[in-house]
Image (tube, grey):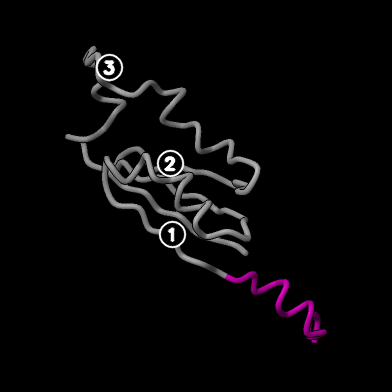
Amino acid sequence: MLFHVMAQHNWETCEGRLEAEGNTKAVSRAERTRWVEGNEKVKVLGAWGYQTEHTLYALIESDDYIAVQQLFSPLVWRGSVQVRPVRDEISMRTDAGDWGK
């Protein structure tokens, strides 16, 4: 199943800003972007950032919603995270035999 994820925080909770300011409690870039690699239950098909609004977008594939939720759980402490199931409309049309009609 495919999921669209949007995670957003603000400048006050931005770990990048905290790290740049030398805050010793800030999460390192390597750790805070670890989710991009996915894991054995969650495949990250694409990940994009819109730095101006402190927003991350991802397209995820997984058969386990809870695994997706767990992958993004560290981001919940910084702001909102939306995980929405989506369907592949191209596959739906192709599978139905309607492609090119």
* Residue 78 x/y as whole percent: 27, 40
Residue 45 included in the magenta stretch of the image: no
Mark 3 crowdedness (10 Å alpha carbons): few <14, some 14-19, many ≥20? few
Q: Is residue 46 left or right of residue 98?
A: left
Residue at image position (44%, 26%) is: 31
Quadrant for the C terminus in the image: bottom right
Q: Which residue in the protein does label 3 denote?
A: 20
Mark 3: which amino acid? Answer: Ala
Locate residue 44 relative to residue 99 in the image: left or right: left
Residue 75: % across, % down: 35, 42
Circles 2 and 3, Cβ within 8 Å, touching? The answer is no
- The quarter of the picture where residue 23 lies is top left
In terms of secondary structure, where does tag 3 sit? helix
14 lies above or below 58: above
Kind of residue at disc 1: Val
Q: Position of residue 86 (x, y in %)?
A: 54, 68
Residues at marks 2 and 3, CA–CA distance in whole angstroms: 18 Å
Query: Of callouts 2 and 3, which one flags the residue occurring earlier in the amino acid sequence?
Result: 3
Identify the residue at the far left of this view.
12
Using a 10 Å C-alpha cutoff, classify the residue at mark 2 as few (fewer than 14 neighbours), some (14 to 19) or many (20 or more). some
Q: Is residue 91 magenta?
A: yes
Q: Which residue is mark 1?
A: 83
Dot 2 amino acid type: Gly
Seen at 27% across and 41% down, the residue is 77
Tag 1: Cα neighbours inside 10 Å, few (<14), some, or many (≥20)? some
- Sequence-first tag of 3 and 1: 3
Please tell me which residue lies in front, 53 or 61.
61
Magenta region: 87-101
Measured in 3D between alpha carbons, the distance from the residue under mark 3 to the one under mark 1, in whole angstroms, is: 29 Å
Q: Secondary structure under badge 1?
A: strand
Residue 17 x, y percent position in the rendering:
25, 25
Where residue 49 is drawn, which disc sits there? 2
